[in-house]
Image: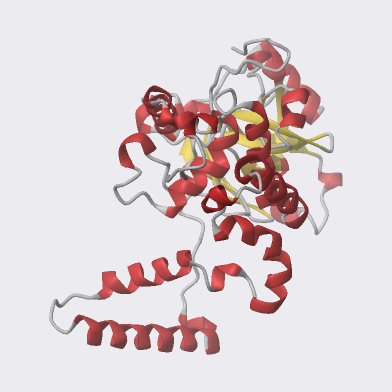
Amino acid sequence: MKCDATDNKDLWDWAVFRDKGIWVEHGAAVAACAPYLPGSFDRPPRNPAEKINTFYKAWEFILWLWGLGPGLLYSILPDKYWQNFCKFVRGIQEAHDCFCKWENEFEQLYYQRRGDRINFIRPCAHQSNHLAAEGFRSGPSVCYTQWTMERVIGMLGMEICQPSNPFSNLTFLAICCCQINALKVMIPDLEPPDGLPPKNSVNIGDGYVLLRACDRYTYNPSEAESHLIHEFLNAPVPKFKWCARLWLPNGQIARCTWKETLRSADKVRMAQNVKVSINNRHEIAEVLYYARLAVKVQADDINNENDEELEYNDDGIYHFVMVAMVSVYSHPDPELLQRSTQTVWSCKHEGDQALQLVGVKSIQSVVAMIPHRHKLPSGVVED
């Protein structure tokens, strides 16, 4: 970045990555997060210290800056700049109000109304004050931003199979693509349905599907697990087998520690951490396993509404309850949460001390939990 003759780079206390050691260490920390990002998060960001100039993707920038940035830049950026950056990240979620606060602080901190620093304020930064208002005039920015153009160019470029007359071929492919899309809109049945549940899965309803793998042997729960199951069912603990995956209504596939711990850390994209509703409160939890618990039903309790959900065996009639055994993380550090504008959730893994049994339909989404050792505002260094 150019420095005007009337300015001095020594006054740029926010330029922490001028120190090559800090930049290299930060890049390694970004790359080390990859195993903890679920596969539904798409491509994980590579080490920016090594790859930022070699086709670093837009999605990698988004995950790096908006997803990992608030946590990884804590204690690297000076506090006032870090808090300002967190407002920007929060602004992505809460839009106009946070964006206006962030942009005003951004200009005061970096630009400082100095003419020799006006090059610090890129049009995309100043535009954030106008995004909401301009949305009514120009429509959503996804319709005219670079991301959409890059996506279309990439899709059409992959379709070109002949090196001769590339532009004529590209025009023809674009016309064909538009014609196909128009036909699909007019006749939706031309597009085969996607997202069909795979074979041997169990459709639970409301968009939830229990997927294989399934353990071949019955599981003997621990004393603490047995107590939770007994309280949940208000019945004796039945025999059951572990299940490995759960398809959520949002399209994500939640996994569990049973299967993910069988693979080496560098060959897994962890999807065992979920956002779950417990007692009408949103919690972050690690799923140990999923299970179908068989509960015996009396003939008097059967009616036309639940008859399809029952299984008739020689020894009785059973109703299956789909559950997940989870270990709930601690609540986030309140001071760090407040200073980061709700963008850094620093929680502790409580292990077996925080076991809970929940219905699978209380699981809302898959989340990423990145190990770290932050020094909290209170001075305590987390494990």
| Residue appearing at x 62%, y 13% in the figure | 382
Specify the quadrant of the image occupied by residue 134.
bottom right
Q: Is residue 366 above or below residue 375?
A: below
Judging depth in this view, the residue of 18 and 359 nearest the camera is 18
Q: Is residue 224 above or below residue 84?
A: above
Where residue 79 appears, as percent x and y from the top left, is: 65, 27
| Residue appearing at x 47%, y 68% in the figure | 148
| Residue appearing at x 47%, y 88% in the figure | 183
Judging depth in this view, the residue of 290 and 379 nearest the camera is 379
Residue 314, can we see it? no
Q: Residue furthest right?
A: 300
Judging depth in this view, the residue of 174 and 149 nearest the camera is 149
Q: Is residue 201 above or below residue 350?
A: below
Q: Residue furthest front?
A: 6
Where residue 160 appears, as percent x and y from the top left, is: 23, 75
Q: Quadrant of the C terminus?
A: top right
Q: Is residue 128 left or right of residue 334?
A: left
Where residue 314 appears, as percent x and y from the top left, is: 64, 39
Q: Quadrant of the N terminus?
A: top left
Q: Is residue 39 above or below residue 189?
A: above
Judging depth in this view, the residue of 43 and 101 nearest the camera is 101
Where residue 313 appears, as percent x and y from the top left, is: 64, 41
Q: Is residue 211 left or right of residue 223?
A: left
| Residue appearing at x 32%, y 74% in the figure | 156
